[in-house]
Amino acid sequence: GYSNRKLTEHHNVVLVDGRGYQGEDRYHVYKDLPERFQARTHSVLAAQGWVHCIGEAGALYPDELGVTSATRRVLFSPSGALLLVDDLSANTDRTWTWLLHTDHRASALPGGRMLARSGPGGLTVRSLDGTGFDQSESLVTANPTASTPSLAIGRTLHTLRREVGPARTARFVSLLLPGSALEEVPDEAAAWSGDEIVWTHAGWSHRVRLTGVELVATAVRGGDTRTLQLP
C-alpha cells in the first residue's frame, strides 16, 4: 500500500499488451479516475461446499487497448480446489498475459504442472488450455514516508506467466490444487474438453459443465455428492 508506483502486474491478473488498469503507475491509483473505470461481480453463490463468482474487469483497462471483456469465473470446490476461467476479448489483436505470484520460485512437475511452496503448504498449478508457464522475478519497493528513505522495504515477486496472442480473444483455464509441500505431489487426472472440465483432488472427483453463464458442477467422494447449478 505504500508503494509510490502501484502496478497492475503486481497482482494476480491478466495484462493486455503488457499493460494493466487505467490509473496505475502512481500512488493514488483511483484519484480523479472517471467512475466508468469499475469492475463488476455477479453470479455469486455458495452451496454444498461450492463457492462461485463471476467478475468483469474489462472496463478497467485504458480505452486505447480496446478491451471489450475481461471475465474471470472463480469456482471453489468442496476439496479446496480452485478453478479459474478467464475469457478475454478486444476489438483488435492483443497479447494477453496471465499472472500468478508465488512466495518462492515454483518447481516444474511432470505433465507441465508447477508446484509453488510456502512453508509446509504447496499449490499445484495446472494449465488446462495448453498454454505453458514461464517464470520471472521482480522487485517491488515501498516507503511509508518519503522523508526517511532508510525505511524503504523491498519484496521480490516470483511470478508464473502464460501468454496468448496476438489475438482478439483468449481463454485461460487454470486449476489450483492445494496440498502439502512435505509429501510427494500426486499426479491426479485433469482435462478440459468442449464445455466440460474434469479433475480429481483429495479423493474428490469433479465434473464442471460450462455453457455461457450457465454452470453445473458436481463433486463426488464415496457416497457423498455435492452439486452446484447456475442459474
Image (spheres, helix red, strand yellow):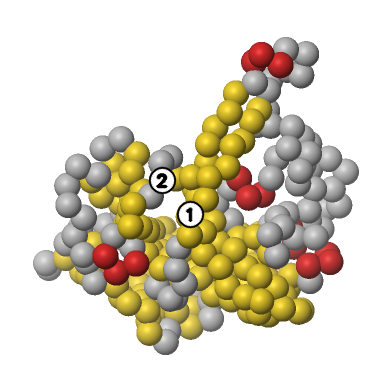
In depth, the one of 155 and 122 nearer the eye is 155
Question: Badge 1 is on which residue?
Answer: 135
The relative height of residue 32 versus residue 42 in the rendered view (above or below) is above
Secondary structure, mark 1, is strand
Question: Badge 2 is on which residue?
Answer: 105
In depth, the one of 101 and 201 nearer the eye is 101
Kindly tell me whether residue 78 is visible in this rendering: no
Residue 143, quarter of the rendered image: top right
Secondary structure, mark 2, is loop
Residue sitting at 56 percent across and 68 percent down? 163
Question: What crowding class fits label 1: few (fewer than 14 Cα within 10 Å), some (14-19), or many (20 or more)?
Answer: some
- The disc at residue 218 is none
Residue 34 relative to residue 207: left or right: right
Kindly tell me whether residue 209 is visible in this rendering: yes
State which tag comes first along the sequence, 1 or 2. 2
Percent x, y of residue 9: 63, 50
Q: Amino acid at mark 1?
A: Gln
Residue sitting at 64 percent across and 15 percent down? 151
Residue 149 relative to residue 54: left or right: right
Whether pointer 1 and pointer 2 mark residues with C-beta atoms closer than 8 Å, the reply is yes
Q: Amino acid at mark 2?
A: Arg
Residue 83 relative to residue 204: left or right: right
Cα separation between marks 1 and 2:
8 Å
Percent x, y of residue 185: 21, 55
